[in-house]
Image (cartoon, rainbow, N blue to C red):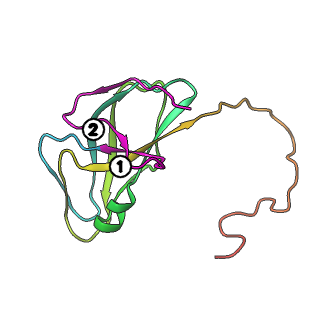
Amino acid sequence: MKVLVPIINRSDNELPAYATPGSSGMDIRAFLQEEVVLQSMERALIPTGLFLEIPQGYEAQVRPRSGLALKQGLTCLNSPGTVDADYRGEIKVILINLSTEPQIIRSGERIAQMVFQKVETVSWQTVDELNTTERGAGGFGHTGK
């Protein structure tokens, strides 16, 4: 099933697109007036020039690109970054340089990927006790490394 998402593209970049027929995420690109140099451990908010009208019941998730992470040490903070259905501002990506070398981001470069997900809303049911499970409250590595 395809979901129709209205989009405004104020950049000179192509629209986000799936790289292959089996891709889950669409690559999104930087829209910069001038290149950004990220020093080691420095972060920056990178604009894309994209504005979305996400249908109710969906969210967009902004996620890192594996190639950037492996080859340049660039990744997204707050990942996955949630774009709510009622947000109408510009899509921006928080990039951080985890490498030991300065990294340059240029306008038009693919900086992240965007995945759309269906979102369920919940209602709370206040109770005095939860059902028990074999796991119980075990967490944070309780099964080993």
Amino acid, disc 2 = Thr
Amino acid, disc 1 = Ala
Prevalent SS, magenta region: loop
38 or 72, which is in the foreground?
A: 72
Characterize the local packing of mark 1: few (<14), some (14-19) or many (20 or more) Cα atoms within 10 angstroms.
many
According to the picture, the residue beneath numbered tag 1 turns out to be 112
Q: Residue at x 81, y 59 (%)?
A: 136
Q: Earlier in the sequence, mark 2 or mark 1?
A: 2
Q: Total label count?
A: 2
Which image quarter is the N terminus in? Answer: top right
- Give the percent coordinates (x, y) of residue 40: 25, 65
3 or 22, which is in the foreground?
A: 22
According to the picture, the residue beneath numbered tag 2 turns out to be 48
Q: Secondary structure at mark 2?
A: strand
Numbered range of the magenta stretch: 1-28
Quarter of the image holding residue 99? bottom left
Of all residues shown, which one is farthest toward the bottom? 145
- The circle drawn on residue 47 is none
Q: Disc 2 and disc 1: Cα gap in Å? A: 10 Å
Quarter of the image holding residue 13? top left
Quarter of the image holding residue 43? bottom left
- Residue 24: in magenta span: yes
- Give the percent coordinates (x, y) of residue 35: 14, 49
Q: Is residue 71 left or right of residue 143?
A: left
Image: 83 above or below 27: above
Q: Residue at x 41, y 49 (%)?
A: 20
Image: 102 above or below 127: below
Q: Is residue 46 left or right of residue 27?
A: left
Q: Secondary structure at mark 1?
A: strand
- Give the percent coordinates (x, y) of residue 107: 18, 45
- Residue 57: in magenta span: no
Q: Residue at x 34, y 39 (%)?
A: 16
